[in-house]
Image (tube, rainbow, N blue to C red):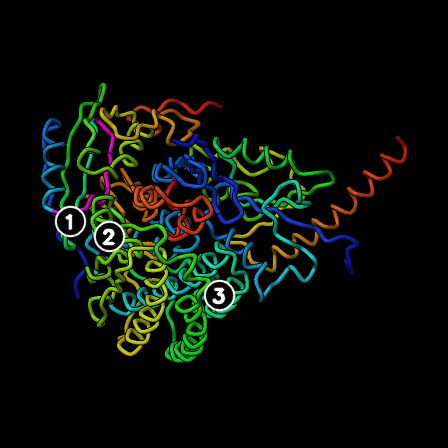
Amino acid sequence: MMVHVEEQSLVVVDKGQIVDKATQMSKEGFRLVQISCLAKDSYEVTYSFDKNYACAHVRVVLPKDNPELPSITGAYFAAFTYENELQDLFGIKVSGLALDFKGKFYKLSVKTPFAPQPQQPAQ
Amino acid sequence: MATRTIVPFGPQHPVLPEPIHLDLVLEDEKVISAIPSIGFIHRGLEKLVEKKDFLEMTYVAERICGICSFIHGQSYCQAIEGVMKIDVPERALYLRTIWGEMSRIHSHLLWLGLFADGFGFESLFMHSWRVREKLLDLIEETTGGRVIFGTAKVGGVRRDMESLTLKRVEDELKIIEKMSHELTDVFKKDSSVKRRTVGKGVLSKEDAITLGAVGPTVRGSGIASDMRKLGYAAYGKISWEPVIETGCDCYARCMVRCRELYQSFDMIYQAMAKIPDGPVDVKVTGNPNGEYFARVEQPRGEVIYYVKGNNTKNLERFRVRTPTFANVPPLVKMLGGCELADVPVIVLTIDPCISCTER
Amino acid sequence: MSFFKKSPWVIHYDGSSCNGCDIEVLACLTPLYDIERFGIINTGNPKHADVFLITGTINEQNLEVVRNIYNQMPDPKVVAAIGICATSGGIFRECYNVKGGVDTAIPVDIYIPGCAVRPEAIIDGVVAALGVLEKKAAALKTMKASA
């Protein structure tokens, strides 16, 4: 009996290519599953797409200082929730958002809590 | 053009057991657009991985949501098992399936009640919850908890069910199944229910894909997308097909859930017939190293657990994308053009679970 | 407590609970537990309510909402913190966005622990809260009489 591990593909692309890649995925009928981010020495933003139960991840690596990302809301409107989350929790500036809450999507006691060096909580 | 008014909906609203806020832009009674704002329940629990080790996080994962609690715990365990390549005993996988489906029945019965309450059919609400209490008794008997099961564990499950208990649970479930028929018949046939749901909150097939809808919301728009088809736990070993409806409206989404109830009963019977003997857990040694995205179908739709470990006790990153988070953009789409009085019903059809969404 | 002179109405707000306690609060209203037999009705309007049932922790965003609901309730009123999160913060106490239990925002009269809290415990707690309510009502009366 084997452990259940799903086959998933992962490609790393350049920041400039992500919009084209998303548009291409959208044309091929992929569904946007999620966008997540890991912040350590750099920002790893992972976009996941799904078509017929096959999961494809596309990763963009951003530098630690002044991380910026173009929005993919042109291809997938639904990305606005994830991209506002990136702005609020990680402090990544997303340009061209279709629905920009300007840092008000979450109301937090700590500014950008998931960014590499979080500020001390106000206490 | 009529004058536009903005009506705030929530956070404290009679139909919502949980807070979500929508700014509804109205022209007379017609909703032109809806702007969601969330964050009332944001706790930041993804950050708790820095303070709790990866085994303790199972309890936190179970408390992301009190309704699909067991499946949250199971998904987290599957994510960790995926990273650590743990071989889970087969009996544990079957038990996870049984408890997972019990949790789905409990969630759908709960939703049917809330939905009935949403359009003012209070006796139907009470009746759904009366049926649900019988199921909660079984859950309590087998796990010890009513809503938070606490039985999921990395490497298996925490409790076993004896064959006598299995038999008794099966008999009881058959009674509950019969009671559910009386209930779902009303949702299916009652003219007052139909008047409030048919043709309301339409989400077309194309929109459902581009907006990334999941769970009963996407299946109500005619797309067979159900993560249980990936074959985790024992879902690959029993025969079933995703439930789909093609109405694309509130009625279709309600029918998906009604039919899924019986599908879940059937899955439990199949799992009980096939469950093998053996241990229910394995010892977990070492620390997770690597990353994995685990996808599991919850009552509300697909959930994604991302874990990344760096060979220490504490995970480097833990991320949950819950079904309601993915269903917020489709909800915004459904609300455009509806009447103000239909807003609560439409909001309820995505089965919003806000505490999941905001974590 | 054998009987109440009044029918106390309750209002429920979910602070940032996981839903477990919320659905148990709702379960109290439904046929098996049925607190309506005590004349207790769940209302959505704070101005109609005597008892404020609150589940979950207090965080930055709901602080004002909770205070707002509390201030809108007429005197005498009682507050019951339901579940371990509302009592002390529970498993989420260490999260960055969590301030703590309900008593960090408004005064709490009754604490009902449990994760998730059981309906029996909620009923017990609400009945205890009603005792407090009657005392507060009596105190209010003497205050008015002496004024």
B186 up-or-down from C23: above or below = below
Determine whether label 3 and label 2 are within 8 Å by CB: no
Residue B153 visible in the shown view: no
Question: Of circles 3 and 1, which is in front?
Answer: 3
Q: State yes or no: residue A30 in magenta.
A: yes
Q: Which residue is mark 1?
A: A55
Question: Is residue B73 shown in magenta?
Answer: no
Taking the image as shown, residue B296 lies to the left or right of residue C65, namely left
Region in magenta: A29-41
Q: Which mark is residue A96?
A: none
Mark 3 or 2, nearer chain start? 3
The amino acid type found where label 2 is placed reads Arg
Q: CA distance from mark 3 to mark 2?
A: 30 Å
Q: CA distance from mark 3 to mark 1?
A: 37 Å
Q: Are marks 3 and 1 in contact (CB under 8 Å)?
A: no
At label 1, the amino acid type is Cys
Of helix, strand and loop, which one carries label 3? Answer: helix
Most foreground residue, B101 or B21: B21
The answer to whether the residue labelled 1 contacts the one labelled 2, judged by CB atoms less than 8 Å apart, is yes
Q: Which residue is mark 2?
A: B295
Residue ID at (50%, 33%): C99
Q: Quadrant of the C terminus of chain B?
A: top left
Secondary structure of the residue carrying numbered label 2: strand
* Residue placed most toward the observer, B119 or C28: B119
Q: Name the subunit of mark 2.
A: B
Crowding near pointer 1: few (<14 within 10 Å), some, many (20+)?
many
How many residues crowd around disc 3 within 10 Å: few (fewer than 14), some, or many (20 or more)? Answer: many
Quadrant in which the N terminus of chain B appears: top left
Q: Position of residue A117 (x, y in %)?
A: 31, 23
Residue located beneath label 3 in the image = B128
Foreground mark, 3 or 2, reads 3
- Image location (x, y in percent) of residue A62: 17, 26
